[in-house]
Amino acid sequence: MANNIRMKAEHVDFYYGSNQTLKDITLDIYDHAVTAIIGPSGCGKSTFIRLLNRMNELVPNSKLEGVISIDGESIVAEHMDPVDLRRKVGMVFQKPNPFPKSIFENIAYGLKVNGQKDKGLIEQRVILSLKKAALWDEVKDRLHDSALRLSGGQQQRLCIARCLAIEPEVILFDEPCASLDPISTSKVEALILELKKDYTIVIVTHNMQQAARVSDFTGFFYMGELIEFDKTEVIFTRPKDKRTEDYITGRFG
Amino acid sequence: MIKPFITRKHQEKLIEWFFFLNGIVVVAILAGIFMLLLMNAIPAFREVSIAHFLSKPIWNPDAYDQPTYGLLPMLVSSLMVTVGSLVVAIPLGIGTAAYLSDVASPRVREIAKPAVEILAGIPSVVVGFLGIVLVGPVISKLTGTYNGLNALNGSILLAVMALPTIISLSEDALTSVPRSYEEASLALGASRWQTVILVKIPAAASGILAACMLGMGRAIGETMTVLMATGNAAEFPHSFLGPVKTMTSTIAIELGEVAYYTTHFYMLFAVGLILFIITFIINLISDIIFHKHTRLQ
């Protein structure tokens, strides 16, 4: 795979108050590929992914050192507004979090806050996003029902559709299947593989099989450090570090 | 073994009764007040019909030949100052609540929240005093009216008094909106203000509505402030710049000098009963909305 580097983390340290949760992370995220971040709970993998769209700025007393860049530009550069960044770098959260609005409104929301006023266009994009997220057939007859009445798996796909609607370039998945049943999980995984064609994807997961199934690159985080980063098949077949091997063979975690 | 004077089982029962009685006292007081108002209101309608009371546009109990006891002037007055106060207090209150919950730094919040609560504790007579010496002259200057003691003045003062309720309950409602909604909105490229206005306020709508209803209940029952600041002319109110005499002021002013056990005396209880019913309904509605809201969380 001849991939270009899309996002880059260089010597990233992150602190919550005086507690350092990420230590000297250097990692490249390749275009049109799925990068998986694995590691045991509390290893900093969610913290890392939330840095990529500046969600962690909402946490009081947090501090970022080092450089994270997208297309060669620092994401905290003067002219880089977090709002603009998040339009480019979308995110799907661990727990499905649809708004308490209708299915239609959930997806239209992102378009509306981004200044889209053309009703016809909004409708087209809602339908297209639902189709891309493989949810259209299940909800096409009840677009104006509350999104909260969907099942967990459907809600998560709705959240993916909502994210796709604003046409981001990078999509961050923060343990997207953590609260889903196996069937919904396989649907979401199939979707991620499909989306890889058009988007750059980063996925945090504590499910190693999932990382092996969907990703092209894998980074193993442990205690706030990036222990190893390589092509997924290398990580899962010939890990260089003893700790990576112990983790993927299930000796701890 | 000696049998104790009171067995444990009886002891439990006694304690249970004690707390039951405590609980029931509040309900009994409420029912008692209602009965008192009702019993004293009924004799008012021996000489005057209920239709007269509810439809006559004049309240003139002292008329020499034909006293009239029309509720409408004071009912409209009360509604005018209440609605007027809400027009001021609701946007200001929700705005302040949104500021406190989403924009203010922790330090500002630490100072502002107690300030809001202290505002709630200012005696109504002090607020009324401000109405006479401050708000009144300002209104008089700006509008060219005689003394500025009118419905507008009362509305502004009642808004000040309803604000703490609206702010602190709305703030609670906004703070209890799940963080995941906020994150979802921000992650979609919405700004903080878009998030507050389009996601958080709608999600907290029932809590905010309940807050406004409680603020309204506070405003409609307030007496001393409106008594001092609204001019108290017993005429049918025509505009916000004219003096009004609310239900509460009427009772407060006239009950002190009315001859006991006359129709006028009983009529004042009838007015009180109406006021009681209005505030009871407002509180009941806000309670229902509020419980629906907390159940959804």
Image: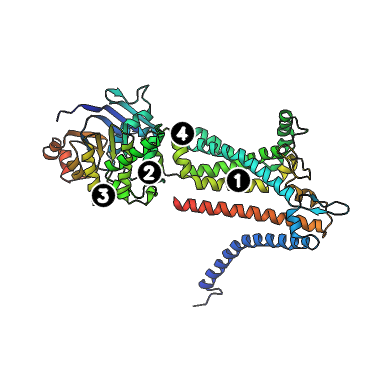
Residue A118 drawn at (x, y percent): 40, 34
**In this view, the mark in front (2 or 3):** 2
Q: Amino acid at mark 3?
A: Ser
Tell me which numbered mark, 2 or 3, is placed earlier along the sequence.
2
Label of residue A104 in the image: 2
Would you say residue B9 is visible in this rendering? yes
Q: Are marks 2 and 4 on the same chain?
A: no
* Labelled disc at residue B193: 4
Q: How many marks?
A: 4
Callout 2: helix, strand or loop? Answer: helix
Residue annotated with mark 1: B215
User: Alpha-carbon distance for marks 3 and 4?
Assistant: 34 Å
Q: Amino acid at mark 1?
A: Gly
Question: Residue B187's quadrant in the figure?
Answer: top left
Q: Quadrant of the C terminus of chain A?
A: top left
Q: Which residue lies at the image location 80% right of the left edge and 56% below the top edge?
A: B265
Looking at the image, residue B186 lies above or below residue A8: below
Specify whether disc 4 shares its chain with disc 1: yes
* Circle 4: element type: helix
Q: Determine which residue is flagged by label 3.
A: A184
The mark that comes first in sequence, 4 or 1, is 4
Quadrant housing residue A203: top left
Q: Nearer the viewer, mark 1 or mark 2?
A: 2
- What residue lies at 28% left-to-right and 33% top-to-bottom? A170
Secondary structure under badge 3?
helix
Do residues under tags 1 and 2 come within 8 Å of each other at their CB atoms? no
A227 vs B158, left or right, is left
Cα–Cα gap, marks 2 and 3: 21 Å
> Alpha-carbon neighbours of circle 1 within 10 Å: few (<14), some, or many (≥20)?
many
- What's the chain of the residue with tag 3? A
- Marks 1 and 2 share the same chain: no
The amino acid sitting under disc 4 is: Trp
